[in-house]
Image (spheres, helix red, strand yellow):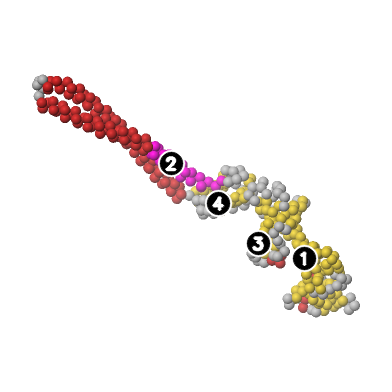
Amino acid sequence: MHVAQRGTFTDTLVTRAVAIPNESVIIASERGGTVIEVRQNASNDVKKGDIIARLSNDDFVLQVTSCVADVTEQTNNLRNIRRLLEKDDLDTRLARQDSRFHLEKIDKETARKKTLYERGILEKATYEQLLDELAHWKTRYAILTTYQERQDRMLPIELAEIAASVKHLDTLTRLIESGLDKLVITAPIDGILSPLTIKMGQQIKPGEKVANVDNPHTYYYFEASFSEYYLGKIRPHDRVTANYAGIDIPLIIASASSVLENGKFLAKLTLAHPQQLSLKRGQSLDLCVSLGIQPDALLIPAKAVFFETDETWVYRYDGKHHRAVKTPVVIQRQGETQSQVLSGLSAGQQVVVLTGSNVEKSNIIKFE
C-alpha cells in the first residue's frame, strides 16, 4: 500500500547507450578471392598499412597479366616506330649529303669541261650529258633538302609525342600491376580492429565487408534505443547524463528517429563537451534521461496503475471495510517509477500494488 501524496514529479528514464567512434573505416575486399593468410585478430591495435589478410584470385591475376602484356606490346610498337623515324631521318641526311657530294663533283667537272666544249675539243653529247647529270643532282638535292627541313620541324614533335605515350603506358603498367595489391587487405588508418570473422580458405566476394578499424582517439557518439512511448518526449537538443567509470558525462540528443522497429526507435547522442574517452565500439554505459519536472504534483507508484478498456485504473484502499476498490483515474504523466494523478484520487488516500494475472478483473478485492 502506498499513500498518494504531493511532491515534485521527476520523469526520469534510465537506460543504456552504446558507444560508436566518430572515425571508423570499413575494410572491404575490392576484388574478392580465397583467404590464404590472416595476420590479425579481433580487437588488435593496428597501424596504417599493416597487413590484415591476403587473398588468392587466379582469374584476377591472369586478367592483370594479360593487361600488362597488351600494354607492353603497345609500348614496344611505339619504340619501334621511334626507331624507324630516327632511321628515316638518318637515311635522309645521308642521302642529302650524298646528293650534295655528287652535285659539287659534277658542277666542278662541268665547269672544267665547258672550256673544252667551247673550243670544240669535247663532243657536244658528252657535255650535254654532264649538264643533265648536274640538273638531276640539283633536283635530287633540292627534294631532299625540302624533306629534311620538314623532318627537322616534325620529327621533334613526333618523338616527343611518342615519348609521352611511352611514359603514359609505363605509368599504366605500374598501375595495372599495383592492382595485385588489392589482394592484400591492409589497415587504412591507425586504430582498433573490430570483429574480424574471416577464416583461412574462406571465399570473399568483391565488396564484401571484412572488418572495421575504429580510431579510439577521436570523439564518440552514442546510440540508445527507446520505447515508442517516449517518441514525443525524446527531443533533439535535450541534455541527458551518462555515467562511465563513476564519472557523469553530459550528453546532448543530436537526433531522434521517427522510424519504429519492434516498438522502439533510435536516438543519437553526442558529447556536450568534447573529451577523450577510452571506449571501444559497442561498449555501453548507463544513461539517465530527464523527461520533465512538475512541482506540486499528486504522485503514486507507476506500478499501481493499470489499463483496461482504454481507461486508466488503480486499486484504492478502503480502510473502513479493509478492501481495495477498482477506481478510474486520470494520469497526466507516467514515469518509470512514479505517475502524476490529475483526478480520481486525493492526497492521503492509499493505493494498492498487486501482482498477478487476474486481479484486474475484480472490481473489489477484500483483505483478510
Q: Nearer the viewer, mark 1 or mark 2?
A: 2
Element type at mark 4: strand
Horizontal side of 312 relative to 110 (left or right) equals right
Going from N to C along the chain, the mark reached first, 1 or 2, is 2
Q: CA distance from mark 1 to mark 3?
A: 21 Å
Which label sits on residue 168? 2
Is residue 31 shown above or below 328?
above
The x and y percentages for residue 322 are 88, 77
Q: Amino acid at mark 3?
A: Ser
Q: Residue at x 71, y 62 (%)?
A: 234
Q: Residues within 10 Å of mark 1 (few under 14, many from 20)?
A: some
Q: Amino acid at mark 2?
A: His
As for residue 339 lying within the magenta part, the answer is no
Q: Nearer the viewer, mark 1 or mark 4?
A: 1
Is residue 27 shown above or below 365?
above
Which label sits on residue 346? none
Q: Nearer the viewer, mark 4 or mark 2?
A: 2
Q: CA distance from mark 3 to mark 2?
A: 51 Å
Is residue 30 shown above or below 225?
above
Q: CA distance from mark 1 to mark 2?
A: 71 Å
Q: CA distance from mark 4 to mark 2?
A: 30 Å
Query: Which SS does the magenta portion mostly show?
Result: helix
Between 74 and 187, the residue placed more toward the observer is 74
Read off the magenta span.
Answer: 160-186
Residue for badge 4: 28
Q: Amino acid at mark 4?
A: Ala
Which label sits on residue 335? 1
